[in-house]
Amino acid sequence: MILADSSIWIDHLRAGLREMERRLNLGLIVMHPFIVAEIALGSLRNRKNRLAELDALREVRVAQLDEVRNMIEAHSLFAKGIGLTGAHLLASCLLTPGTRLWTRDANLEKAARALGIVFELSPPRHG
């Protein structure tokens, strides 16, 4: 499963990402309510239907604040340029086995990589 953060969703909603569409069609994309809330703060075409579609996606286990705080300490994630939403996404990925985080945020990607939960697109095959 793949948890795409707000940066990926914004790119997808603006321009359509082929890889995102493919993974959505395969049922591989999961959602976190903080991401839907962040998207809801923006301007959306067909707003009501779009938000309903996002709400209908399978949801990761949402970490409780004490779980996020414990993860921050256990993995020394302080002073790494990660915000609370990003920390929640990391914790939720860790609490939802088999979930990887897809992000364009460099600090968040670095933390996800250190935790072994980063999602990376496979490089194109040649030949």
Image (cartoon, grey):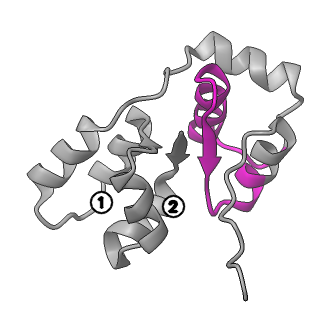
Q: Give the range drawn in magenta.
A: 80-109
Q: How far apart are marks 1 and 2 (CA)?
A: 12 Å
The numbered dot on residue 42 is: 1
* Residue displayed at 43% across by 72% down: 17
* Residue displayed at 51% across by 50% down: 4
Asked if residue 99 is positioned above or below residue 48 in the image, the reply reads: above
- Can you say which quadrant of the picture contains the C terminus? bottom right
Asked if residue 49 is positioned above or below residue 16 in the image, the reply reads: above
State yes or no: residue 126 in magenta: no
Quadrant position of residue 96: top right
- Quick check: marks 1 and 2 in contact, CB under 8 Å? no
Q: Is mark 2 on a helix, strand or loop?
A: helix
Mark 1 vs mark 2: give the one in front: 2
Residue 124 place in picture, x, y as percent: 68, 78
* Residue displayed at 21% across by 63% down: 44
The amino acid pointed to by label 1 is Gly
* Residue displayed at 81% across by 52% down: 110
Residue 95 place in picture, x, y as percent: 62, 20
Q: Which of the pair 4/122 is nearer the observer?
A: 122
State yes or no: residue 88 in magenta: yes
Asked if residue 49 is positioned above or below residue 93 in the image, the reply reads: below
User: Which residue bears the numbered disc 2?
Assistant: 7
Asked if residue 32 is positioned above or below residue 123 in the image, the reply reads: above
Q: What element carries label 1?
A: loop
Instruction: Tell me which label, 1 or 2, sits earlier in the chain.
Output: 2
